[in-house]
Amino acid sequence: MSIAKQVSNLATWRYMPEEFFCHVRKYDSATKNQTLFFQDIADMSIKSIILCSARGTGKTDALATTALWSATVLPYFLQIPIRVVVISGSQLQSDILYDYCIESIESDSYVASQVADKPLRHQTKFKRGWIKALPASLKSTLGHRADLLIIDEAVEAGDNIIKRAFSILSGSKLGRVIISSTPHEYMSFFVDIWEQPQEFGFKKHGYWSQLECPWVTAEQIERLRQTLDDVTFAIDVLGEPRSPDTFFPLEDLKECRTKERPRYDGMSYTQMGIDWGWAPAPTVITIVQVLGDKRDHLQMLYQKPFTRMTPTKLDNIMDTLISEYEIQKIYADRSHIHENQRIIGRGHSVQQVNFRGVKPQLMGEMRRIIMQHEIDIWENESALINELRLYTEDKKKGQDRVDSLALACWKSQKSKSNILVPRSGAYHRLPSTFGDSVKDRSERKTSKE
């Protein structure tokens, strides 16, 4: 390629990355979605982009080309080296995107001319920059710096990796990030960003659907429509986030999450729930407070599982928590009567609950609370949120945190007794369950004094 031709191509590629895409990938044209995406890539004022796509829509191809364009075309105009880091759900997924880059290096003379050293398995150095493909790990997010961060299959990479990875851009003059994924996990940070892009400072495009891809035939689409359930079809074929039909509706569960950790209000009504564990299952302690004049809104203040702990040590922990949060009522699974009697013997108010017998009512009440957004759960309580997300009525294990939360919330809302409670999509009326009179907080404090 002559110098004049190369300069002409560079001038075109700088503001039309889709032309660079067609050149290096040997395509006749880009799809409409790819073209719109590349228009934003050319606009350096756009720092953060999110792509939500179905499977097989050409997003990885577009992302690989963006990495190459950033490392081989953009530096010619900006006159600075540009570092590109690619993170995916696994090293294998990162390597798939990186292999697309290697294919272009091997097949295109211009891209090859920009390579400074022989490409390595996970890194290629160019004359002005480099591309690295990293696994989704905290070590990767802490040990590298870049000017362009690409997170592919972000849902599989995980919420913590996405949040921590943004620090890779610290100190960069460009500081651009692209996150992309098939939205197969509704309760994910990726979907949070997609649904509220302005809050997180991202620009989003329309769904990358297989319906827009000329290489996917109408017959193939129809076959998938007939074989997949509606939720899976929406996610895999249309690229749209969908919430599956779960016991605790995921749309409502998302509304119950809070960015800030709830703090104890010294004037609030507090309850503790204890789900005793049979080894190796843990004993889980949960504390909630009830706010408002009508005592109709809950906040989870504390939850922790305990394993391999002597009775004396666990008793001391409970006494400390009861004193610190001024617990007024404790609901405990009656499976461990002796342990409950020890707590009662120390002067605390314990209501023993036949968990198996009233579990439908307990979980029905918990479901109603979540569906009406009447509880705040700190978003960092990932273990609990994951259990709520996966909860089923038939499952016997791995629900200790949910059970403990349900006990802590039981009979806590004074104004919500004798109301309709949803159970697995149906409704039934509970008898009045608020039978425990509790002194006003100010009266209790006065009596203590």
Image (cartoon, rainbow, N blue to C red):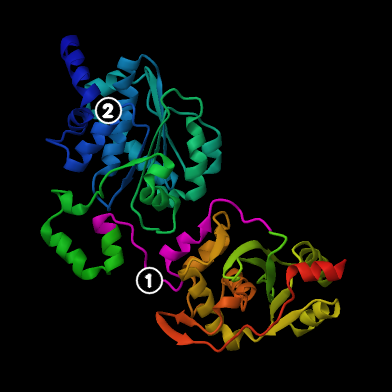
Q: Quadrant of residue 241?
A: bottom left
* Majority SS type along the magenta span: loop
Q: Which of pointers 1 and 2 lies earlier in the amino acid sequence?
A: 2
| Residue 75 is at least partly visible in this image | yes
Residue at 34 percent across and 27 percent down: it is 45
Point out which mark residue 245 bears.
1
Specify the farthest residue to the top.
3
Q: x, y (%) of residue 190?
A: 41, 49
| Residue 240 occupies quadrant | bottom left
Q: Amino acid at mark 2?
A: Ala
Badge 2 density bin: few <14, some 14–19, many ≥20, Cα 10 Å: some
Near-viewer residue (154 or 133): 154
Residue 88: within the magenta? no
Whole-number angstrom distance, CA of label 1 to CA of label 2: 41 Å
Q: Which residue is mark 2?
A: 42
Residues at badges 1 and 2 in contact (C-beta under 8 Å)? no
Measuring from the top left, give residue 58's x and y in whole percent.
24, 44
Helix or strand or loop: what does disc 2 sit on? helix
Quadrant of residue 318 within the rendered picture: bottom right
> Is 229 placed left or right of 317 in the picture?
left
- Name which residue type carries label 1: Asp
Q: Which residues are magenta?
A: 236-264
